[in-house]
Image: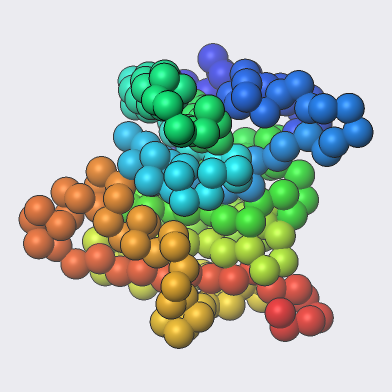
Amino acid sequence: SDHQLEYPIRPEDYDWSKHYPAYFPTKPGATPAQVEFADIGCGYGGLLTSLSPLFPTTLMVGMEIRVKVEDYVRKRIDALRTQHANLPHTAPSSYQNISVMRMNAMKFSPNFFTKGQLSKMFFLFPDPHFKKRKHKARIVTSTLLAEYAYMLRVGGILYTVTDVRDLHLWMVKHLDEHPLFVRMTDAELEGDLCVPCVMGETEEGKKVERNKGDKFLACYRRIDVDHNM
Ligand code: SAM
């Protein structure tokens, strides 16, 4: 459980170089690369591996609480890095921009990210916690949304997808109620490269597809309190 994990007291204390060795050390005078996308409860890593070539210079991290799953994703990324490093005519940086960490994202995310650091956060097929008394364990709650709003920059996007209608309505309700998030329209999302990936590239999304289940998408833009950007 949590106590075996090490959490930095402040984001500045965390060493990201072990996650993205190709990006460190930073050249003198350059700003250190920072993680911009966070996949919360990343599962087996399908989102990260599909987004990596689409945003080849953006650092992304998956957060996963299960030891074995995190281990699987780490090995998957290592293998991709090795394969692509050996291919001619491919950027040596292929798959160098994705990584995974084992952590309880509901408790410790703000220890890892500074204010406004993230431009995208993904909540894909989160655990539904069906029973009413378990609802407070859901990954989207008013309290946690305040943290997500803190880490997301103004203009950043929070993506949610689920096959569970009740959970979808729950997430929409809480996000709608929050003053710092505004739901994006279909027109605004047209051409967003992430949308097809969040809908179809995760392992859970594929499973839902095989079972011909529904998928509910809701994406929210982080807005400024005064300026409705
Ligand atoms: N997003 C992936 C997908 O679409 O394939 C995985 C979906 S799976 C149903 C939910 C994942 O969230 C599980 O792998 C679970 O271990 C992880 N998870 C649940 N609570 C978490 C927490 N507090 N912090 C990090 N990961 C968590």
In this picture, is 134 found above or below 74?
Answer: below
In this picture, is 180 found above or below 7?
Answer: below
Q: How many marks?
A: 0
In this picture, is 74 found above or below 147?
Answer: above
Q: Position of residue 125 (x, y in %)?
A: 33, 53
The image quadrant of residue 199 is bottom left
What residue is at 54 percent from the left and 44 percent from the top?
56
Way the structure is coloured: rainbow
What residue is at 53 percent from the left and 62 percent from the top?
158
Residue farthest top in this picture = 4
Q: Is residue 51 left or right of residue 220?
A: left
Q: Position of residue 14 (x, y in %)?
A: 72, 25
The image quadrant of residue 120 is bottom right
85 or 120: which is nearer to us?
85
What residue is at 79 percent from the left and 27 percent from the top?
26
What residue is at 79 percent from the left and 81 percent from the top?
227
Residue farthest front in this picture = 89
225 or 71: which is nearer to us?
71
- Is residue 127 visible in this depiction of the protein? no
Q: Position of residue 179 (x, y in %)?
A: 66, 75
Q: Position of residue 123 (x, y in %)?
A: 44, 53
Image quarter of the C terminus: bottom right
- Is residue 218 visible in this depiction of the protein? yes
49 or 225: which is nearer to us?
49
The image quadrant of residue 30 is top right
Residue farthest right in this picture = 29
Q: Is residue 145 left or right of residue 42?
A: right
